[in-house]
Image (cartoon, rainbow, N blue to C red):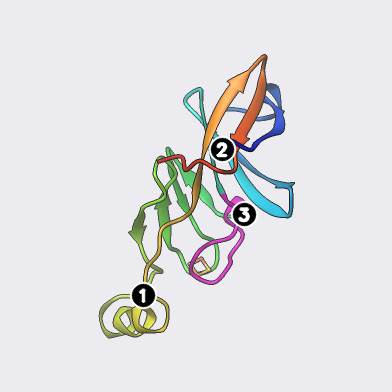
Amino acid sequence: MSSLVDVGSVRDLADGEMRSVSVEDKDLLIVRVGGEFFAADERCPHMGGRLSKGLLRGTIVTCPRHGSRFDLRDGRVLQWTEATGLALTLVKAVRSPRSLRTYLVSVREERILVDLDATGA
Ligand code: FES
């Protein structure tokens, strides 16, 4: 079973660009990198920062609030906030690292389709 939603035309997103799209009560992050499209939750799993306002380098997105970094290919955490040492231990005790939810993306007739029921990993 899939729940495909149309989030726009491939022409709306240049390579290396990301944007937020609201569909079915969800805020999604849609990203184009090297001709591939990725979709993830727009809100950072740390404390809800808007990832579309962050930094994109390749498939790595950095949250603008506290610097957590995630790989959009599978949502894995590469860095949990910018904290280090004891501060990082405290940050992890308050909110343990958790992956960014990603979604399966397909392109059909130049439309970007996101499956809300299937993970992108
Ligand atoms: S809200 Fe994203 S790193 Fe804190």
- The numbered disc on residue 31 is 2
Secondary structure beneath dot 1 equals: loop
Outermost residue, top side: 109
Magenta stretch, residue numbers: 41-52
Position of residue 16 relative to residue 77, above or below, is above
Give coordinates of residue 107: x percent, y percent: 59, 22
Q: Is residue 25 left or right of residue 70?
A: right
Q: Is residue 45 magenta?
A: yes
Give coordinates of residue 93: x percent, y percent: 35, 83
* Residue type pointed to by label 1: Ala
Spatial CA span between label 1 and label 2: 26 Å
Q: Residue at x 39, y 69 (%)?
A: 82
Residue behind mark 3: 53
Position of residue 12 relative to residue 28, above or below, is above
> Reading the chain from its start, which is encountered first: label 3 or label 1?
3
Spatial CA span between label 3 and label 1: 20 Å
Position of residue 63 relative to residue 91, above or below, is above
Q: Residues within 10 Å of mark 3 (few under 14, many from 20)?
A: some
- The numbered disc on residue 83 is 1
> Reading the chain from its start, which is encountered first: label 2 or label 3?
2
Instruction: Specify the quadrant of the image occupied by residue 32.
Output: top right
